[in-house]
């Protein structure tokens, strides 16, 4: 059975749902943000400031390639679908789940999350976040086999829906 790969915009619940899925399935969760921080040796925000988004995207592709060899739940970064190469990797997997949420809900979650500072949202208004969000929607949809709406839902409900849709590891 294949890994379950979670994609979606920042704040959609990839990390939270990934942890719960891993617990439920008694497997490992591999979180892109944690892997990236280990590999780059600094926070993602600091890396963005120092090297820019293009360099970050290259590292993110490398981490995706490495992660596809792992067993368990893979929680990707929100921008993983921006590169066509990454979308092709995802399209060739059977258990890619797009965690979709209403934009207002995403903005609310991101603003409230003081632990996980997101470079693309730190200094942006809701309208600016919308400008980042909207072009990604079709990319998430084209990359995923399943879409699960996380808006105003409990994490446990989301996990159950994912398990109903995918082939369990």
Image: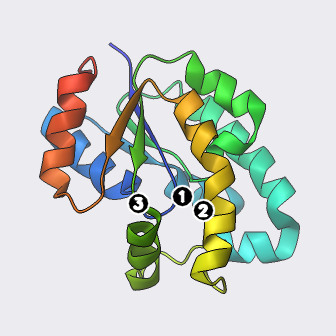
> Between disc 3 and disc 2, whose residue precedes?
2
Q: Is residue 152 above or below residue 42?
A: above
**Residue labelled with disc 1:** 33
Circle nearer the viewer, 1 or 2: 1
148 relative to 45 in the view: left or right? left
User: Toward the viewer: 1 or 152?
Assistant: 152
Circle nearer the viewer, 3 or 1: 3
Circle nearer the viewer, 3 or 2: 3
User: Toward the viewer: 136 or 112?
Assistant: 136
Q: CA distance from mark 3 to mark 1?
A: 22 Å
Seen at 68% across and 51% down, the residue is 135
Seen at 19% across and 55% down, the residue is 155
The quarter of the displayed image where residue 12 is located: bottom left
User: Toward the viewer: 98 or 138?
Assistant: 138
The quadrant of the image that shows the C terminus is: top left
Instruction: Classify mark 1: residues with Cα within 10 Å, few (<14), some (14-19) or many (20+).
Output: some
Mark 3 in CB contact with mark 2 (< 8 angstroms): no
**Residue labelled with disc 2:** 37
Q: Position of residue 33 (x, y in %)?
A: 54, 58
Mark 1 in CB contact with mark 2 (< 8 angstroms): yes
The quarter of the displayed image where residue 75 is located: top left
Q: Position of residue 151 (x, y in %)?
A: 30, 58
Q: Is residue 114 visible?
A: no
Q: CA distance from mark 1 to mark 2?
A: 6 Å
**Residue labelled with disc 3:** 102
Q: Secondary structure at mark 3?
A: loop
Q: Secondary structure at mark 1?
A: helix
């Amino acid at each position: 059975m294949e890994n379950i790969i979670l994609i979606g915009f920042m704040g959609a619940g990839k990390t939270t749902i990934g942890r719960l899925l891993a617990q439920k399935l008694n497997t490992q969760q591999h979180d892109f943000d944690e892997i990236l921080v280990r590999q780059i040796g600094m926070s993602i925000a600091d890396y963005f400031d120092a090297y820019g988004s293009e360099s970050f995207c290259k590292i993110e592709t490398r981490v995706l390639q490495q992660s596809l060899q792992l067993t368990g739940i893979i929680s990707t970064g929100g921008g993983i679908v921006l590169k066509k190469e990454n979308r092709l990797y995802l399209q060739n997997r059977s258990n890619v789940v797009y965690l979709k949420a209403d934009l207002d809900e995403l903005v609310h979650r991101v603003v409230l999350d003081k632990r996980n500072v997101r470079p693309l949202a730190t200094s942006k208004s809701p309208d600016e976040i919308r400008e980042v969000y909207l072009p990604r929607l079709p990319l998430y949809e084209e990359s995923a086999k399943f879409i699960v709406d996380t808006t105003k839902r409990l994490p446990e409900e989301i996990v159950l829906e994912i398990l109903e849709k995918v082939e369990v590891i």
